[in-house]
């Protein structure tokens, strides 16, 4: 068991995460009914207000706080308890992040920041919204530095040794996060804040969008890598084996540092201000991310097959039936992985240059987001929640909670399957994203969006409602395991941190030479971004004044 | 010829097929989107 102070820190992060989850999913429920024309919001509440809140609270706040809760627990477990300085800096980071969150959320709730999760200029929120976002990022940096310094202390006392796999992966994710944030910090500090507080009159829209997506794509990997950590480090323990290959796991993680950042233009393929050459280069670099993703898929299947065969599985697929399906900690993550197969395939379509024309700005993208972040990442976090909170609180994860966990995971899967399938199909039929309900003067194409079983906004609303029900079940489980479940007194009732062993004997040492990977990452970023960003600045069009469309 | 005491190789035939199936899903979805693109 890790130190009580570290547990408190981790639980505080997880508590904020699930508060954001509660509010964010409520906004999601309202959205699907508005898109279905089933309800109308009161005059004081705007669709774009709840759309912004949904995106920010779930994609940014829930994920980030949960990730730091997971990191704190795992780093304390794998490297030893935090020292007083690390703990103090972690708390400072936590509170700065909370203050940023509260400020940004207050601006959204008060109707001063309905600029959606991507906050594209020239949509202009209150300057305090961007100050809130800046504080949020600074807070995460402070928390990151605390974790890095904890790691550095371990390295000093264990000279020449490779760090435990969990710590290695945490540091990889943090490096990715720190490099990625440079883009959003640059645009918020030097473009949005001066513009929104009236220090300058206009903003360079193309530059701001490019800096946002320099951050926006690796942000996806900031969500995904902690889920991969669970897949690589936790899942083998749950299925009764060790990490399939320590070297493969580490190599796939460092490849994500290299290839997840210089790729932001694949989100801007329809924008006229970037030449095709640079778009094409970044599309190619995007495809490189497929390599570590498929390495992960291979590693997972190999882990399952090894464990299943060890448990008596025979034949080509007999091992599949020998996996611990009755263990909700495993089943939840397995389902999350399964969702990532079509999710990842959809991502390749999105990034395929001309093919992007078919799906860009349609509901397809929303569906894609929900079967990537909304399920593989979110459901992996749910699978972690089932043991992480009882581990931290010292409470039982009772049989009743385990059964409820299955109901929660099944309902989330069914709801997501209905909603995201409808979104994908509607997107292919041309239904737009980022818009409230509109009948477009009862155009024939628009009316099609309410027909059929799969290709209907009604299906989307039913799926969204099931998802909300599932979210409330999860909140119930979180509250119970955090505050109300009986304390685990007997050893058999105590919940453990399931961390698999990882053989490091044949792992090359250079995999943990961070300067190599950071150096290559910056070289690739320079190649992919220096000239196009330089062009944007040198040949900047007249800036845009702000718009407040709500 | 020297004899080595090597650990038996793990049987990963199922893994190989599963990875191919993942690849197939990717290819089928991509081609479907491509055909839609060319048809429009």
Image: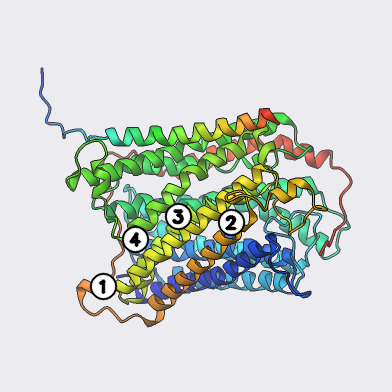
Check if mark 1 and mark 3 are on a common chain.
yes
The x and y percentages for residue A176 are 53, 49
**Residue A504 visible somewhere in the drawing:** no
Looking at the image, residue A70 sits to the left or right of residue A131; the answer is left
**Nearer mark to the viewer, of 4 and 2:** 2
User: Can you identify the residue that label 4 sits on?
Assistant: A329
User: Can you identify the residue that label 2 sits on?
Assistant: A459
Q: Earlier in the sequence, mark 4 or mark 1?
A: 4
The numbered mark 4 sits on a residue in which chain?
A
The x and y percentages for residue A102 are 64, 73
The numbered mark 2 sits on a residue in which chain?
A
**Nearer mark to the viewer, of 1 and 2:** 2
As helix, strand or loop, the secondary structure at mark 1 comes to: loop
Looking at the image, residue A236 sits to the left or right of residue B23; the answer is left
User: Can you identify the residue that label 3 sits on?
Assistant: A226
Looking at the image, residue A284 sits to the left or right of residue A191; the answer is left
As helix, strand or loop, the secondary structure at mark 3 comes to: helix
């Amino acid at each position: 068991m890790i130190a009580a102070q570290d547990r408190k820190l981790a639980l505080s992060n997880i508590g904020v995460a699930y508060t954001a989850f509660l509010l964010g999913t409520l906004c999601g429920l309202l959205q699907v009914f508005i898109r279905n024309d089933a309800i109308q919001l009161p005059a004081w509440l705007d669709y774009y207000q709840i759309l912004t809140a949904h995106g920010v609270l779930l994609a940014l706040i829930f994920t980030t706080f949960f990730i730091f809760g997971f990191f704190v627990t795992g780093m304390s477990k794998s490297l030893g308890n935090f020292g007083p300085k690390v703990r103090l800096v972690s708390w400072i980071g936590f509170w700065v992040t909370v203050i940023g969150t509260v400020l940004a959320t207050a601006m959204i709730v008060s109707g001063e920041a309905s600029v959606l999760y991507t906050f594209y200029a020239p949509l202009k929120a209150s300057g305090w919204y961007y100050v809130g976002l800046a504080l949020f990022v600074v807070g995460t940096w402070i928390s990151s530095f605390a974790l890095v310094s904890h790691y550095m202390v371990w390295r000093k006392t264990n000279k020449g040794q490779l760090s435990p796999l969990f710590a290695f992966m945490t540091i990889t994710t943090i490096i990715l996060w720190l490099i990625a944030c440079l883009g959003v910090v640059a645009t918020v500090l030097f473009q949005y804040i001066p513009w929104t507080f009236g220090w300058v009159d206009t903003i360079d829209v193309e530059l701001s969008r490019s800096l946002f997506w320099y951050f926006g794509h690796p942000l996806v990997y900031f969500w995904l890598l902690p889920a991969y950590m669970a897949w690589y480090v936790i899942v083998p323990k749950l299925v009764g084996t060790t990490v399939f290959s320590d070297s493969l796991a580490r190599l796939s993680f460092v490849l994500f540092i290299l290839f997840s950042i210089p790729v932001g233009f694949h989100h801007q393929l329809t924008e006229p201000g970037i030449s095709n050459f640079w778009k094409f280069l970044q599309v190619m670099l995007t495809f490189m991310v497929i390599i570590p993703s498929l390495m992960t898929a291979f590693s997972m299947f190999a882990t399952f097959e090894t464990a299943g065969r060890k448990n008596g599985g025979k034949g080509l697929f007999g091992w599949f039936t020998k996996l611990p399906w009755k263990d909700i900690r495993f089943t939840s993550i397995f389902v999350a992985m399964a969702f990532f197969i079509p999710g990842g395939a959809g991502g390749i379509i999105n990034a395929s240059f001309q093919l992007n024309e078919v799906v860009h700005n349609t509901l397809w993208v929303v569906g894609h987001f929900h079967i990537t972040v909304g399920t593989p990442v979110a459901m992996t976090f749910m699978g972690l929640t089932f043991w992480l909170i009882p581990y931290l609180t010292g409470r039982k994860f009772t049989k009743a909670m385990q059964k409820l966990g299955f109901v929660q995971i099944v309902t989330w899967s069914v709801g997501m399957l209905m909603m995201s399938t409808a979104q994908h199909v509607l997107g292919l039929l041309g239904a737009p994203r980022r818009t409230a309900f509109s009948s477009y003067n009862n155009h024939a194409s628009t009316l099609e969006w309410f027909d059929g079983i799969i290709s209907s906004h009604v299906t989307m609303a039913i799926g969204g409602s099931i998802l909300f029900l599932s979210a409330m079940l999860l909140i119930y489980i979180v509250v119970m395991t955090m505050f109300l479940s009986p304390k685990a007194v007997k050893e058999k009732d105590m919940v453990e941190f399931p961390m698999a062993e990882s053989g490091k004997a044949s792992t090359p040492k250079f995999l943990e030479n961070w300067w190599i990977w950071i150096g290559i990452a910056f070289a690739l970023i320079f190649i992919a971004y220096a000239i196009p960003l330089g062009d944007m600045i040198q040949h900047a069009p007249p800036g845009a004044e702000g718009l407040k469309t709500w | 010829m020297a004899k080595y005491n090597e650990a038996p190789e793990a049987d990963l035939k199922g893994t190989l097929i599963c990875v191919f199936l993942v690849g197939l899903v990717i290819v089928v979805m991509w081609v479907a989107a491509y055909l839609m693109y060319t048809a429009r």
